[in-house]
Image (spheres, helix red, strand yellow):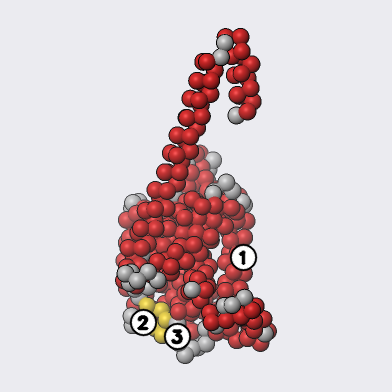
Amino acid sequence: MFTAIFGAFESGIIYAIMALGVYLSFRVLDFPDLTVDGSFVTGAAVAATMIVSGVNPFAATIMAMFAGFIAGCLTGIIHTFGKINALLSGILMMIALYSINLRIMGKSNVPLLNTETAMTHVRDFWDKTGIDAFFNSILSIIGLGDSLPRTWGIILFMVLVTFTIKFLADRFLQTEVGLALRATGDNKRMIRSLSANTNLMVILGLGLSNAMVAFSGALIAQQGGFADVGMGIGMIIIGLASVIIGEALFGTKTISRTTLAVIGGAIIYRIVVTMALRVEFLEPGDMKLITATIVILALIMPKVIDRTKEKKRKAKRLAENMTLSELPSGGKGEAGAAIKSDS
């Protein structure tokens, strides 16, 4: 059980980068960008192909991020200059990327099992520190010796990378350009009246969003040991599920809190899916059904909770009014003031 949760946390922290990209397009820009399903594979395809060709895996991962940025910018150009519907622009780019990804890889699948990747470099470096043995000895002491993870290096490395990206995203969204980007998503007419170029903001926002998505795809390919042309199917739903779950559980009062909530949502989503797949009557093929169910629950539960709270507030106000009506006329003013001060 612990090994399964550990693996879910490890993959969840990588998918969190993709979820941050989805948050940027869907929440900040208010742009339903379906390019994600294609750009995720683009990142994996570029990284895997370059690594197999002998390129440094870290450089290949950075190049994958730039490829995702270009894909996102193209979606923005199709929408802004081509005057094509936002949803349709994403769909068109996603379809185009399927063929582009096949061209990049040269085949439908590129294996990385016997290749030096960023993850193997991190694992090798971590083995030399002896920290794995330290953590595993603690687990053995508390009775989890049969569930020892292979290495702690990848998860700690990815926590550092993901929170660095989160911090940079927070800082960027508080700059002048970031504020203009947020304003573009809130009210394009208003930001145009201030002489801001909304077309440029949309293109930049979608480019940054898909850069994070492609970066996540490149890391997932190196973690899993392969890049596949079909690995991005349903990725937009996973990203949305992470955003919705995180917002529902942790709130959205500030930008930094919201991005932290998105990371938490991605991790929780992966853990829930992992636990669900351990149920006997569910199979790996049911993963999309599980995802859809999680998204539906994440959308419905906050509304149910809000309705319940509203009913309690109404019942409280009704009880207060009943109390006031039963008091003599002279005591109503004092009692009303006391009730208001309590509330």
Amino acid marked by disc 1? Thr
Q: Quadrant of residue 233?
A: bottom left
Point out the tag, 1 or 2, that comes first from the N-terminus: 2
Amino acid marked by disc 3? Leu
- Give the distance between the C-alpha atoms of the residues marked 3 and 1, in whole angstroms: 26 Å
Left or right for 286, reference 7: left
Looking at the rendered structure, the secondary structure element under dot 3 is loop
Q: Quadrant of the C terminus?
A: top right
What is the number of callouts on the image? 3
The answer to whether mark 2 and mark 3 are in CB contact below 8 A is no
Q: Would you call the spot at circle 3 few (<14 residues within 10 Å), some (14-19), or many (20 or more)?
A: some
Front one among 238 and 79: 238
Q: Is residue 189 visible?
A: no
| Up/down of 190 relative to 262, above or below | above
Amino acid marked by disc 2? Asn
Residue under numbered circle 3: 112
The answer to whether mark 3 and mark 1 are in CB contact below 8 A is no
Residue that extends furthest to the top in the rendered view of this protein: 330
- Give the distance between the C-alpha atoms of the residues marked 2 and 3, in whole angstroms: 10 Å
Q: Would you call the spot at circle 1 few (<14 residues within 10 Å), some (14-19), or many (20 or more)?
A: few
Q: Image point 37% across, 53% down: which residue?
A: 296
The answer to whether mark 1 and mark 2 are in CB contact below 8 A is no
Q: Residue 123 location, x and y as percent? A: 58, 83
Numbered circle sitting on residue 109: 2
Front one among 283 and 110: 283
Looking at the rendered structure, the secondary structure element under dot 1 is helix
Q: Is residue 272 visible?
A: yes
Residue under numbered circle 1: 164
Q: Image point 67% across, 81% down: which residue?
A: 134
Looking at the rendered structure, the secondary structure element under dot 2 is strand
